[in-house]
Image: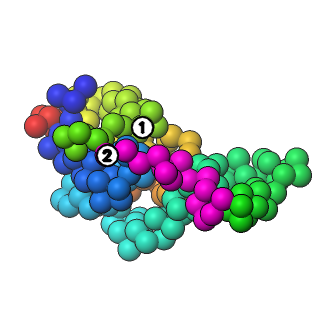
Amino acid sequence: MFERFTRGARATVKGAVAEAERAGAGSVTEEHLLLALLEQEGGRAAFAVTALGLHDRRASLEASFAEARRRGGLTRADTDALAGIGIDVGAIVSHVEGTHGEGALDPDRGGRRWWRSGHRPFTPGAKTVLENSLRVALGRGDRFIGEEHLLLALTAKPGSVADALAEHGATYTAVQRALYGSDGGAAGQGHAQAG
C-alpha cells in the first residue's frame, strides 16, 4: 500500500511520527496524522486545510483532542448518548480525577514506553485511517494515495478527530467540497505518480 503514497502523503506519515515524538506519546494516533497534515504545504490537502481555516485553529483542535483524552476517548456522541440514559460523564471524569489526578482517564497517561530505535507503532485507529485512505483513493478512481485522501479518511472515521474536525466545520462533505469543488470532482481526474 505504501508504494501508492505520494511524497506528500509519506511526509505526512513521517510528520505524524515526529508529532508523536514531540508529544512523548508511545504510539502514533489519528491526532498525530491530522496535526502533521496541518503542517503540510503546497498540496491539495494544504489548500483544503487553509480554505477551511484549520491552520488558524490548531490550538483549538489540540484542546478538543485533550478534552476527548480527558474523557477517556469518548466522543461527543458517546457522551450525549450516556447523558440520554442519565449518566453524567463530566461528573464521572471529575470524580475519577479527584481521586487519581488530572488526566487519569487519558489512554496515554502513565503508559508511555520508550521504544528502541525510536520506533513508535501506529494505533489501530491510525492504521484504519491509512487503510481507509486507500479506499477513498480507489473510490475516486485515483491510482495514488495523497494527503487529500488521508484528510478525507480522517473525517470519515468516527472518533474524537472526526468530532473535532466537524466542530471546526471540516466534515467529510465540506472537505470534499474544498478539495474537489461543489460537485465533488470527477472520479479518476488527474492521476499522479506515487513518489
Give the residue at x 29% y 54%. Answer: 21
Give the residue at x 39% y 33%. Answer: 127
Question: What is the CA distance from the residue labelled 2 to the residue labelled 1?
Answer: 15 Å
In the rendered view, tell whether residue 97 sits above or below residue 129.
below
**Residue 86 appears left or right of 40:** right
**Percent x, y for residue 153?**
42, 41
**Percent x, y for residue 3?**
17, 28
**Residue 182 appears left or right of 188:** right
**What's drawn in magenta, residue-wise?**
100-114
Q: Main secondary structure of the magenta part?
A: loop
Instruction: Please identify the quadrant where the C terminus is shown.
Output: top left
Foreground residue, 169 or 110?
110
> What secondary structure is marked by label 2?
loop
Residue 106 part of the magenta-drawn span: yes
Q: Which amino acid type corresponds to the residue marked 2 in the rendered image?
A: Trp
Q: Which amino acid type corresponds to the residue marked 1 in the rendered image?
A: Thr
Name the residue carrying label 2. 114
Instruction: Please identify the quadrant where the N terminus is shown.
Output: top left
| Residues packed near mark 1 inside 10 Å, few (<14), some (14 to 19) or many (20 plus) | some
Label 2 vs label 1, nearer the camera: 2
User: Dividing the picture into quarters, in which one does residue 99 lie?
Assistant: bottom right
Residue 95 part of the magenta-drawn span: no
